[in-house]
Amino acid sequence: MEGKQSFFHGTLEATIFDATPYTPPFPFNCMLANGKPTFVTINLENKKVAKTSHERDRVWNQTFQILCAHPPDSTITITMKTKCSILGKFCIQLRKILNEASLINGFFPLQLENGKTNPELKLRFMLWFKPAEFEPAWGKVLKYGGFQGLRNATFPQRSNCHVTLYQDTHHSSEFQPPFSLCGTPRKLWEDVYKAIEGAKHLIYIAGWSFNPKMVLVRDPQTNIPHARGVKLGELLKRKAEEGVAVRIMLWNDETSLPLIKNKGVMRTHDEDAFAYFKHTKVICKLCLRLHHMFPTLFAHHQKTITVDTRAYSSSVNDREIMSFVGGVDLCDGRYDTEQHSLFHTLNTESHCFDFYQTNISGASLHKGGPREPWHDAHACITGEAAWDVLANFEQRWIKQCDPSLLLPTSSIQNLIRQPFASSISNDWNWKVQVFRSIDHVSASQLPKTLTVEQSIHEAYVEAIRRAERFIYIENQYFIGGCHLWDKDKHSGCRNLIPVEIALKVASKIKAKERFSVYILIPMWPEGVPDSEPVQDILHWTRETMAMMYKLIGEAIKESGEPGHPRDYLNFFCLANREKESKEEFVPPHSPHPSTQYWNAQKHRRFMVYVHSKVMIVDDLYILIGSANVNQRSMDGQRDTEIAMGCYQVPSENPESNSTSTPRDIHGYRMSLWYEHTGLADDIFLEPQSLECVQKMRSLGDQMWQIYANEEIVDMEGVHLVTYPVNVTVDGLVEDVPDGDGNFPDTKTSVKGRRSKVLPPIFTT
């Protein structure tokens, strides 16, 4: 890499000022004085990355931040248009900006469709390139207080917030990570129950899937015994009868048809929930994810709960807003603990009425396990950022439902928006910004220049660029950077997250600095593994991995130093294997022999489904929400999503005249790693070190062998396994040498296959 720039990697700030005014020929100059509304688009490699508003006077003065991680032979095209015609364009190769001028500013003549330049038609614009390597690291930014949040987001960064981070929906009483920083992990669904029960004015729920018959509290040892066995729908109906405004907004899956009682492709219970609350005081609305091209394809994927709660202040009458955000829907199969049992809980309160297994055709409790264990991540916020989650709900409701059904917050007495400075404790030291993937079709009040919000994608990219030591990701999908894939470059999966990670690693190799990336994904995306959609997604995942390892392998080779791509980047998944116990459920029926179901039951194993959507950078910054790492979630015009990025502000100690950084994010990662590995190793304190990478890799390889072998060996609470691919020293991704290329107990290829039926927009 010495002596050459192999990538145009950074942010291109583009400002479109104005253009030559329109002067219609006589005799039309009286009638068409200002001409047609005109707008400007900016394309990067034939993909539209920015668009101005439509203005008759051709004055815009609009600025766009364009994220770039592209080869330097790519082209930026700036085009001026009306609704009916292309007026002219200006093209420039990224290499010219990279090598000759990082700032281009002027009044430039535009090229016509015939290739000739029109000197009388000019566009005034400025392009300013800011290389990613100049982004200050999180440690420096937080130390000097220089991070103001993302600009291209509806909601600004908020101060003096409180954040609680959750792993899974529940925990056994024995689960206690042996680190002083971790504290006792909170129990998500018990906290959700208490929040709903304690609301006096409003309960707003937005979901992708929602089952009103779901029981939130199932633990015999719970400290809220009166909540055991209470169905969520009954609790909400009771609160509505008390006068609380209960509003539920669910994605309307058009494949679920109530007339024939069809559950729909995604089995989200949308019609069940609507029918359940009919003729009650709970108002439940089903909302389509409207799209001009594919009206039934995309979803409302946000998962939020907002309630009013007793305020953190001296007055018992004060109320404040509390919001939950993350990956967990209030529906079947989500209840699980750190044990992620396959068979042992099927006759217990936890899962005897909640058997969930969507990856095996015909699976049911009557035929026995394995159930599908579920790992997820969620968060709760109070402070001004919680109001932003409320505002998101209101904007979506106003766009697609009756606005008069919302409760005006101004009508709630003693409702505090921001805690008084004197009452703020050290726990309220979080800065939080709410991000979204959404467009004007699904939300009201978007800014004029922001018809599509992609702030989740931008937040991920910015967080990666500021990384200094390591990145840890848990996500249901990991697909992106198709412009650098060996095949399928035009699949449309252009989010930059995987590319940014690979380029970050490459830059650290060049600088001879340690850096580590740990990525946790499920073995395969939810669904029958040999189905067309699952195989397609596995194919995209393999393309993404191959692209990343190739870039890292090239960087190692160019550095001249010894090393292996897996010294820097590793993919893992979660799995479980249980020996039979005397007390476990004995099913009255058996699966058909030689099927995937029969094999999984016989071998007593199954994957733990990773559904979390979280990224931790340097133990200082965390992104958590509903968004997957794929184009559907990051695009803004596909699935609607919500997430939050947050960090803690260093606190000053007057006695020692020093500052210390709170370690809640660090404690959360250590708690996650303890759940996955069963270890409390000091080497986990240095996740960027080669020793830590080797420890995790060795454990993952060892546990994969235990999981994949014929002999049934109990995994004893250790769930981390290496994702089953082999990576060569040159960065080539291959099937595991001693396997058949399939996931255990299936005939499903790990590398997937490209569908001949499904367009890429369905599965990317």
Image (cartoon, helix red, strand yellow):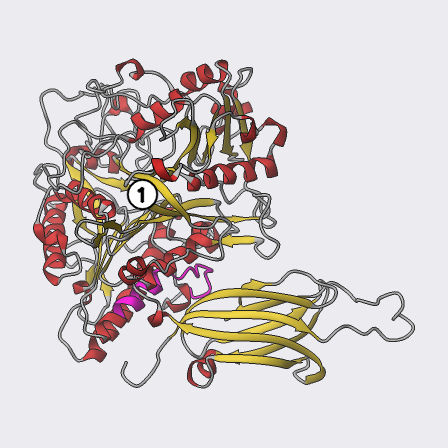
Residue 395 x, y percent position in the rendering: 56, 40
Q: Is residue 377 visible?
A: no
Q: Quadrant of residue 466?
A: bottom left
Residue 380 x, y percent position in the rendering: 35, 36
Q: Residues within 10 Å of mark 1 (few under 14, many from 20)?
A: many
Residue most extreme to the front: 655
Let me know if residue 268 is in the magenta part. no
State the quadrant of the N terminus: bottom left
In the rendered view, tell whether residue 381 sits above or below residue 124. Answer: above
Q: Residue at x 23, y 68 (%)?
A: 731
In the image, taking residue 565 as reference, residue 489 lies left or right, namely: right
What's the magenta region? 488-506
The residue tagged 1 is: 612
In the rendered view, tell whether residue 725 sits above or below residue 183. Answer: below
How many circles with numbers are drawn on the protein?
1
In the image, taking residue 84 as reference, residue 625 lies left or right, namely: left
Let me know if residue 500 is in the magenta part. yes
Front-lying residue, 187 or 717: 187
Residue 241 x, y percent position in the rendering: 49, 13
Residue 523 x, y percent position in the rendering: 26, 47
Q: Residue at x 51, y 25 (%)?
A: 413
Q: Is residue 41 visible?
A: yes
Determine whether the residue tagged by mark 1 lies in a helix, strand or loop.
loop
Q: Amino acid at mark 1?
A: Ser
